[in-house]
Amino acid sequence: MRDSSKAGAVDWLYVAPALLVMGVVSLLPIFETFRLAGEYHRLAVDTRFWPVMRTTLSLTVVTVALELLLGLVMALVLWSPFAGRGLVRAAVLIPWALPTAVMAMAWRWIFNADYGVMGDLLFRAGLTASPQVAWLADASSAYWAIVLADVWKTTPFMAVLLMSGLAAIPGELYEAAAIDGAGPVRRFFMVTLPLLRPTIAVAVVFRAISAFGLFDLVYVLTGGGPGGRTQTLSVYIYDVVFRYQELAYGCALTVAMAGVLVLLAAALLSLTRREEPR
Amino acid sequence: MRPTPLGRVFFGLAVAFVTAWSLAPFLWQVVTSLKPAAEVAAVPVRYWPSTLDFGSYAQIFKARPFATYMWNSLLVGLGTTALTTGLAAAAAYAFSRLGLPGGRWALLAILGLSLFPGTILIVPLKQLATRAGLLNSLTGLVIAYTALNLPFAIWVLKSFFDRLPKDVEEAAWLDGLSRWQTLWRIVLPLSAPAVATTAILVFIFSWNEFLIAQTLVSRDAARTVPVGIAMLSGVTVYEVPWGQIAAAVVVTTLPVVVMVLAFQRRIVEGLTAGAVKG
Amino acid sequence: MLRRLAPVVLAATVAACGRSEPADGKVRVRYLASPDVGGFSKVIIERFEKANPGIKVEMIEGPSSGDARENMYSTAFMAEDDAYDLAYVDVAWLPKFAAQGWLRPLDDLLPPATAALFLPGDMEGSRYQGKTYRLPIQSDGGMLYYRKDLLAAKGIPVPSTWAQLVAAAKATQSKEVAGFVFQGKQYEGLVCAFLEVVWGFGGDLLSADGEVLVDRPEAVAALTALVDAIYKDKVVPQAVLTYQEEEARNAFQEGRAVFMRNWPYAWNLMQKEGSPVRGKVGIVPMVSAPGGRPAATLGGWGFALSAYSRHPREAYKLAEFFASEESQKLAFLQGGILPTRRSLYSHPEVLRAAPHMKDLGRVLAAARPRPVHPRWPRMSDALQMHVSAALSRQETPEEALKAAATEIRAAAAR
């Protein structure tokens, strides 16, 4: 159809309303951010910047990878017909449906050192010496607590998007593969995965962006502790802007963050685009 | 493609795992919300309340106009979903089919908009809303959320439209339908899985959003659920009312579950097998 | 389905947004506070409006988290809007708010003779660079709670030095009962608790002329004492690294700790019917090193006047009304809000309802505000992080405080 129609100015009318809304609400504040940003030299000497960047990147990579794996499993399971599928689908979406700030409180309660159900369960299973485990007191267990809570919360997002991608795969391809004698595992790698690639790209890019901006979970669950080991870039920027009132530097950090994200998104997009059939 | 018995068992286990993983932390909230106050924090952990106590539920509706919050959230959620899906569908169709000059760059620029963390947007957003008279207004929230969701919605829909077979549209075109009519009558219904997916994810986003709602709204009449939950408080400022928070989590999840049950069938229909060619 | 629903939803959304601004000619005074648990603020406001028929008060009940409210105030003030006439501020926010020019000084409204009626710490914490910006409404200060019964059973006197505290904790603790708990999570409360120990060891964070003292031997000794209490003396459970106020109070109230550092709010809850420690609890100022001076970190809230308010006089009137002896008494008796007026700590009606107020008065008289510096939040965060790192043994006390001092000096020099 691209060939049969001549693009004209009038076609932009389809896009105009969306652009208008985004322009007013998102673009103006972003201009504002660039205008206010300053003190870039501090990025080089800020002792917080690199540890925070490292934590943020590592959390992004780990959570998105786990979510993709788990999300694929979920999508495949929920895609196959079975009795009660509608209910299971609704159940799977529940983690995504809960307000993060609130569920983060709930996780704090689950990981509570004195009353937490996590410690109690593992104790009953014989995995810990005592039901009182101070999960959030230790840098690495606090890190994994955040990973667990975030993966739990956002995997449904991944799964639902991947399901919509599965919906676009014509069934006859599977049939053809099955006739060729391909088992379910081979069918997955030969048909599902390649055809799912564009959807995976979109899902991973958007998930990575929002994982990189992880805020409320960390803020509520650990406050960035212990010893600053779970502080993310968003939490730091929030502190710099609102608590320290260093607006110029906070905006500079935001610009730096957006720069890293541009690189990240570009890398992800080119990675998935390269092998896409023309 | 008849599954082997081993495959069946394996699949059953996968369903069980996915369901348990998604539900367990939520069910823990259900149990917590039903405990009498004294049992919420008990050593050792109680896995079932001695008596079912609905006090926490009574409290959240008594202490705060929780029904108003939910109604507001519902309006904002549906408003945002309708507006976002509508605007995004038009834009995505143009990007996918109309061969807009510079469309690729526009798409990347739109993705770029979502690279900025929400935390940095709130001060400029508040200024904008004040100037536009949209403080304490649900409309203000709908516009802000729409803008924030459009990049994601446009990308998802565009990647789905790209893969729709073009022959149906061309046929419609030959039948004398305008492009606008083609979009509404042919493309959108065919894209039901992607539209439903987008709608669900957008609805849930606005149902959960906290920071912007907190910034733009300071009156009970226009408060949404996450902000309302943050107002739950115990006897003292230090106390975290775990039981009430758990009850709020349960109550706020119900509408989303209903919404998902209503929409999930849409994800299944649409593009499966040969239905398209029909 | 969406297509049919959209117009309906949009119409409903727009309809729900009609805004009401009654045109009754009254001056409106707005402020943001935590949810009014117990409802005494509403009573005080009703009385105020009756006495001042030309003024209508709008108390906006915000989220219960202080951080969230600080953010809401900051957002409003950064946008320079007059959404709030008064700011109900934590003593820790004051230097920052004042330095940003968000607050209007009160010196022309508050005569020195009136100021002298308040607790000295509360007034000191209301000043910034020689000007007064806040009328204190609610006082607060950290202290040491102890189990009278457990100490008496072993014949151990109430400790007044750090060494005595550790020894007493060791002698009384058991497998189920920890020796000492405090707020050890990485957050502002950790700095409050740490500061009391530092003061007790004769150290400080900043000198009066702004010199950074964080890496001096006194502070290092204080942090070493805290770290040793966890890992060497083993009188503090490692779980305190996750403790805020409530976690500590729960542990103590359920009889799982002999000593606790906490704010006064815990007292009322522990004396409630059904509390396992009811009548078994004593309070003293935090212990010090020999030769040190016991001190309490000052907390507390008060009204400051927004620089953007269009009705400063009316707004101040409301602040004054809340600070009156009558209102403070009501807030204490109905809501347990600690008064800032000295007279109330010896007021017969108050003492009849709460005899412990005499001890509390002593603690609060020794309360000192945190360092008054516009960059305090950044300094506090640096301290929180490194003290927390030391408590979780990621850094030694010397390393931690040296790093914190470097960051604090960098912040101060900026």
Image (cartoon, coloured by chain):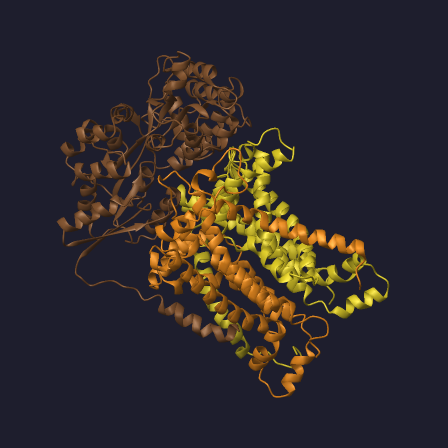
x and y percentages locating residue B126 in the rendered image = 38, 56
In which quarter of the view is residue B66 placed? bottom left
x and y percentages locating residue C156 in the rendered image = 39, 12
Seen at 74% across and 61% down, the residue is: A192
Chain colored brown: C
Q: Is residue C78 left or right of residue B203?
A: left
Q: Is residue C295 left or right of residue A62?
A: left
Residue C47 seen in render: yes
Residue closer to the observer: B2 or C142: B2
Q: Colour of chain A?
A: yellow
Residue A5 sits above or below residue C300 on the image: below
Q: Furthest-front residue in view?
A: B51
Q: Colour of chain B?
A: orange
x and y percentages locating residue B227 in the rendered image = 41, 52
Seen at 21% across and 43% down, the residue is: C319
Give the quadrant of the C terminus of chain C. Answer: top left
Q: Furthest-right residue in view?
A: A181
